[in-house]
Image: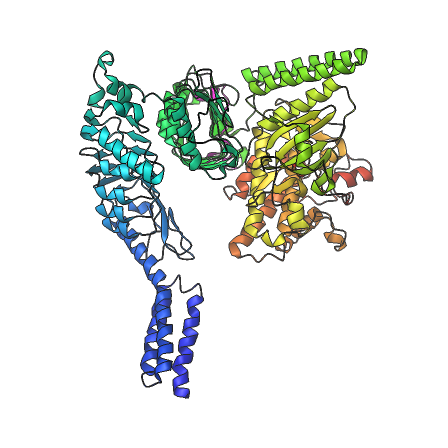
Amino acid sequence: MDAVRHPCARLAWEASLTTSLELTTSLTTSLRLVDHCSSSMTELVHASPGLRGNCRWRCLSLLFMALPVWATLEEGTILLNWKGQMSNGGNLTNWAGLSDPCGRNSSWFQVSCDSAGYVQWIDLGNSGLSGPLVPELGQLSHLEFLSVYNNSFNGEIPQELGDLTALNVLDLSANQFSGLIPASLSKLTNLENLNLKSNKFLGSFPVSLMQLYNVSELNLDSNYISGALNVTRILILTDAAASLHGQSIGIVSLMNNSVTDVDYQPDDLLNTRTVFKLQGNPYCNASVQSYDDGRRCFCLQNCSITTPQQGTILYNWKKTLSNNDKLINWNDMADPCASNPWFHVLCNTDGYVQRIDLGSSNLSGPLVPELGLLSKLETLTLYNNSFNGFIPEALGNLSALTFLDLSDNDLSGSIPDSFDKLTNLTFLKLSNNNLSNFYLDSLMGLPKLTDLQIQSNNFSGILNYTHWRYTIQGAKYEWFGIYSTLVNNSITDVTYQSNDLLSSRVVGLEGNPYCAGSPDLYDNGRRFFCAPMTVSITSTHGKRLAIIIGTVSSALTLVLAISLVAMFKLRAKRIFRKLEVEYRQKFAEFEVNPEPFLYNDLRLATHDFNESTKLGQGSFGTVYKGTLSTGNQVAIKKLKPITAPHGIEVDDFLNEVVFITKMKHRNLVDLKGYCMRGKERMLVYEYIENMDVEQSLLLGKNKEAMTWPVRFNICLGVAQGLHYLHAYAQPRVIHRDIKASNILLNINYAPKIADFGLALLFPDEKTHISTATVAGTRGYLAPEYASYGELSEKADVYSFGVLCLEIVSGRKNIDQTRPADQVYLPSWAWKLEEEKKLKDLVDPSLHLHADEVKQALRVINVALRCLQQIPDRRPSMSFVQTMLQGDLEPNEIVFTPRAMVDSSILEDSSVIEESALLSGPPSESTPSAESTGR
């Protein structure tokens, strides 16, 4: 019995290891287990059939558990063999050895894996590589994304790529591929993006590709496609795809090829929903005057787009978007410009779509190329959503476009070259995305562009400032200026001439590697390019703002005088309505569109502002959770009544609405609209799901979700939001009340800074101001602000430092239950720093590995830099953000004990106590509503 028990026990023990993570990351472990299994079966040859069967089953289980290991190692071998056939494969330095590309400790360059351990994503775009695509790539059965754009890959596309049936994106553009396009690609029915432009492909147009019904645009520009294009046959295939699957390829782009003729029937020009772009082909080289209808359709412009076709374009786009409930009346059978206009769509008097406003609509999905067919579109605003993928080249066809805002999304790739055709564009905002490929010359020549914002992307490389400076001679870049929008990218160097530094243009490269290091060591170039951005009030927009402020002040005085003299209720109402109309005009002037909510709608949404819907209360009012008739949830901040005359109330309130609405950043709570009724004022915000940092972490209501990665991302997100308020809001904004209860957490625990009711707007030429009224919360107040009311952005930096210590430690900044030397968190942090025991500050409930401990200590050190007693010693939020990301090491921290307050300035001890931020615990009132904007 013992002789039999031994191998079975060993086999059971080995089988139990199959559930361990080691098995999925080690081929050696897998082979050892299978070898032991085989040995055990040999030892059991004389055992009973039942026992042998049981052990045989365990052996099979081992083999099945080992399969993913062998599979991913085989995928690694495929990639290594591919690398071996590349020139400049040295760029893929960590594609090496017997390592598994999907192992626990693997991080192969630009390779990602799915949860099952299979290669899912290969993105080698713009990597300086050359060589062929190897046929073995067709064995990567789980691959969904393959991009090698802008390299020097060559040879023919292997037929085997047609076996990648899971593929969603295939981008082979801007290489040197040649030969015929394989018909096997038509099997990639999950493909959504196929880009083959700028290669050397030969032969006639591959009609079989029209079976790729999920692809919105088929781009074969700039190849050697030749012969006649059979449009009739192509349309038969697209109609069949549309009938079977509800969609088909919308754009076939063959510009700059060698197409000599087009076969079509006259009805094709009337019924097609597919656009053909053949500019730059021999077929289109005839005289414009001699063009027949076909050439006019295919060569000069797209076939005439009627308003029902506009509806089809928008409806098909809607179907690709998640969370599209707001677009409930976008349907395939309706005209967006008919008597029942579509939500968020405005049309001109001729019945063409002129404006699409979908900012802050919680939408996700791609931008489809068919949008480029909306030839009369003037305004497209899609900011603060989750749109992803590439920006379609087809948007360059929107020749009437004047205003394009795609900021605060997840767009990647490059800025399309076709944007050089947007000659009417005045405003282009692409900030806070993942755009790369630093080729912006096409934007420099746009004659009407006055506002370009591209900060916080992934632009990298060297900026040729001299070239740019001469490229944009005569352009009218106002307000931010072209260069000020390059902050927070990855620019490593700048080439320039000495006379370039005499330019008066606004320049800003803060947050780039080029600007890392101590400002004291900057050469003249870095001083010019890396200096914190300021904006002159002499710009056109600044003058306009100054005029508005002056006009508003005059109007306020006039309204106040009328109210005091007349005191007639009807007169007051008329003034109220007049001001509201005036401000709607101002909303349009400032390119903002806050929604005016009806009081009764908000009353119904909150059950008559019932106590059960109350989220919190603060010094400026109460916040309620409301559910609108559409089902959307909002947070309604009902401000406390103000006794001043109507004119001042309305003017101040609507000014605040303008400023808050313009503040668009992924880490700021978004203002949806406003409500005015008599003296009542309400602000309507987006509703944030996961409470705030105080409730979730410090009060422990959701502490289990507050892992270290979540906490670090909160610190980084708040830093990015504050940097936006300090550097890019117009006018710049000091929050004045950064605290845990004002940091809301969305469904993904991303931070949103709330409560701009306390924000102080100040002119750009002032570095600080003095205020008689100190707003904010004890425990977070900067010394100079608490003592003298001196306010600058460095007060927010101080508060941010306190907040970071709270997040790392998991405790409030004032805790009377702790030992005396730990009651005040900043003091305790300084004490631990002096004792070299900063690890003791880290929340003991966190179980951090070595890298996370290092990151936590970095956050603490950055926080201590923010807590410097002297404001000038505190870093800007731009540097804070850079230090948190690890791109810049915190400078040596000057030790500033709590008791050290300049006695030559502060005379009485009560002021010293207040200035040290430690004058007592905060009031234990209702949770802060100012916190929520909810």
Dividing the picture into quadrants, the one containing residue 763 is top right
Up the image or down, 896 lies above or below 40; here it is: above
Magenta region, main secondary structure: loop
User: Is residue 90 magenta-colored?
Assistant: no
Q: Can residue 681 be seen by looking at this rendering?
A: yes
Q: Nearer the viewer, residue 916 or 124?
A: 124
| Left or right placement of residue 412 versus residue 268 in this view | right
Q: Residue at x 79, y 24 (%)?
A: 643
Which residue is most to the bottom? 1
Image quadrant for the N terminus?
A: bottom left
| Left or right placement of residue 557 versus residue 417 in this view | right
Residue 399: x and y in percent read 39, 19
Residue 301: x and y in percent read 31, 20
Q: Nearer the viewer, residue 717 or 8?
A: 8
Specify the color scheme.
rainbow
Dividing the picture into quadrants, the one containing residue 300 is top left
Residue 682: x and y in percent read 68, 29
Q: How many marks overall?
A: 0
Up the image or down, 615 lies above or below 654; here it is: below
Q: Nearer the viewer, residue 673 or 698?
A: 673
Up the image or down, 355 lies above or below 233; here it is: above
| Left or right placement of residue 249 versus residue 815 in this view | left
Q: Nearer the viewer, residue 5 or 128?
A: 5
Residue 618: x and y in percent read 73, 37
Q: Can residue 279 be seen by looking at this rendering?
A: no
Q: Which residues are magenta?
A: 499-517
Up the image or down, 791 lies above or below 155; here it is: above
Q: Residue at x 71, y 40 (%)?
A: 616
Image quadrant for the C terminus?
A: top right
